[in-house]
Amino acid sequence: MCRNIRTLFNFQPPVTEDEIHAAALQFVRKVSGFNKPSKTNEAAFQKAVNDISRASYDLLQSLETAAPPRNREEEAAKATACAALRYAARPQ
């Protein structure tokens, strides 16, 4: 999975529509290979982003869990620590 696409389920506060849209945009960029589509492909690109956003929103609304919601700040700190270890291990 693309490193820029983050888990959106079971967070406190809940995911926003902007976060869902950003994840959908990253997914379409990854799949299409376009960071920004040409004018010819722009409508298809935007339709894909909107369709994936809608499907993702529906999915997230229908999921259930017994696990307590995760804290965004704690998860961000964990990700930062993992990245620091990953990049520190690379030879210069």
Image (cartoon, rainbow, N blue to C red):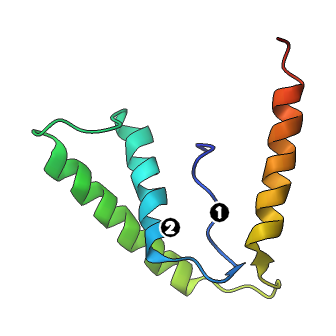
Three-letter code, disc 2: Glu
Q: Nearer the viewer, residue 52 or 19?
A: 19
Report which residue position mark 1 lands on. 7
The disc, 1 or 2, on the residue closer to the chain's N-terminal end is: 1
Quadrant of image for the N terminus:
top right
The secondary element bearing badge 1 is classed as loop
Report which residue position mark 2 lands on. 19
On screen, residue 37 versus residue 90, left or right, reads left
Residue most extreme to the top = 92
Mark 1 and mark 2 in contact? Answer it, CB < 8 Å. no
**Residue 18 sits in quarter:** bottom left
**Residue 66 sits in quarter:** bottom right
Residue 41, horizontal then vertical, whole percent: 16, 41
Residue at 77% over, 82% down: 69
Q: Across the whole image, how many numbered discs are drawn on residues?
A: 2
Residue 82, horizontal then vertical, whole percent: 85, 44
Label 2 neighbour load within 10 Å: few <14, some 14-19, many 20+: some
Quadrant of image for the C terminus:
top right
36 relative to 14, above or below: above
21 relative to 62, above or below: above
Residue at 85% over, 56% down: 78
Label 1 neighbour load within 10 Å: few <14, some 14-19, many 20+: few
